[in-house]
Image: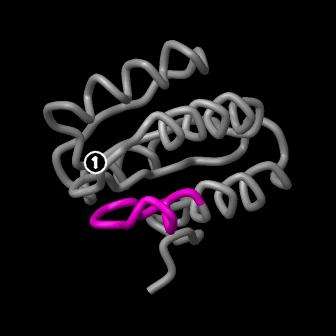
Amino acid sequence: MERARFVTHKGKQIFVLDCQEIETAELLSLIDECARNVRVQPENSVLTLTIAGGTTFDSETVSKLKELTKGNAPHVKAAAVVGITGLYKVILSAVSMFSRRRFYMFDTLEEAKDFLANY
């Protein structure tokens, strides 16, 4: 299964970024792939779903996530995140403040996909 891909849910295209249980080097590559896919889409058109959990973050990773979210901002209509607990909430808060974007947090993938499909 690809970690960065578009899926269709209830007739809406959602860009899924699966970051769970991933090594740092692969995550950095995945961030670049996300930027390439999202930034070619029309402005304010992309619904994103990030699946987090079980990944370690260092300062380089957090910096790259900040750059990703800020650069993707013009293209993203709404962003949902699943799997955020503990330290991940602190990281997401920092990324959110830096990029001036809002991330909607959900407990399950289905809740997140339903929210995005109805956004």
Q: Secondary structure at mark 1?
A: strand
Quadrant assignment, res 76: top right
Disc 1 designates what residue? 82
Q: Residue at x 66, y 33 (%)?
A: 67
The residue lying at 53 percent from left, 40 percent from top is 60
Q: Is residue 63 left or right of residue 40?
A: left
Q: Is residue 21 magenta?
A: yes
Along the viewing direction, whichever of 58 and 85 lies nearer the viewer: 58
What residue sits 53% from the left and 49% below the top?
48
Foreground of the two, 9 or 73? 73
Q: Is residue 6 above or below residue 102?
A: below
Q: Quadrant of residue 74?
A: top right
Q: Residue at x 14, y 32 (%)?
A: 86
Q: Residues within 10 Å of mark 1 (few under 14, many from 20)?
A: many
Total numbered circles = 1
Give the percent coordinates (x, y) of residue 108.
Answer: 19, 53
Q: Position of residue 110 (x, y in %)?
A: 26, 59
Residue 91 vs 4, above or below: the answer is: above
Q: Is residue 77 above or below residue 51?
A: above
Residue that lies at the very extreme toward the bottom in this rendered image: 1
Q: The disc labelled 1 sits on which kind of residue?
A: Val
Depth check: give the residue in front, 22 or 92.
22
Q: Quadrant of residue 9?
A: bottom left
Is 16 in the magenta?
A: no
Which residues, given as a range, are shown in magenta?
A: 17-28
Give the percent coordinates (x, y) of residue 57.
Answer: 36, 44
Residue 51 drawn at (x, y percent): 35, 56
Visual colour scheme: one colour
